């Protein structure tokens, strides 16, 4: 969130979101 606020809405936005989603999916997979 802080990163988005610093850079504002830009091309980084979607990349960060997809990276975060992948990380979340990996975390979920580890818990399974």
Image: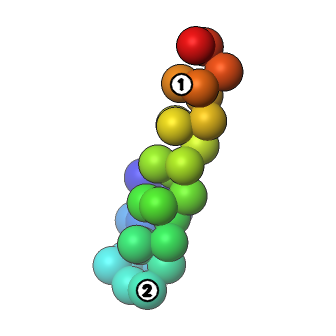
Image quarter (top left, top right, bottom left or bottom right) of the C terminus: top right
The residue lying toward the viewer, choosing from 6 and 16, is: 16
Which tag, 2 or 1, sits closer to the chain's start? 2
The residue at 47%/61% (across/down) is 18
Work out whether residue 6 can be spotted: no
Residue lying farthest top?
A: 32
Residue lying farthest right?
A: 30
Decide if residue 13 is on the left or right side of residue 32: left
Q: Position of residue 5 (x, y in %)?
A: 39, 65
Q: Residue tagged by mark 1?
A: 28
Q: Secondary structure at mark 1?
A: helix
The residue at 46%/48% (across/down) is 21
Q: Vertically, is 20 above or below 25?
A: below
Decide if residue 2 is on the left or right side of residue 30: left
Quadrant in which residue 10 is drawn: bottom left
- Tag count in the figure? 2
Measure the alpha-carbon separation of dots 2 and 1. Answer: 27 Å
Q: Vertically, is 15 above or below 22?
A: below
The residue at 60%/13% (across/down) is 31
Q: Secondary structure at mark 2?
A: helix
Q: Residue tagged by mark 2?
A: 11
Q: Position of residue 7 (x, y in %)?
A: 47, 77
């Amino acid at each position: 969130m802080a990163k988005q606020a610093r850079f504002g809405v830009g091309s980084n936005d979607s990349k960060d979101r997809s990276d975060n989603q992948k990380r979340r999916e990996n975390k979920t997979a580890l818990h399974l």
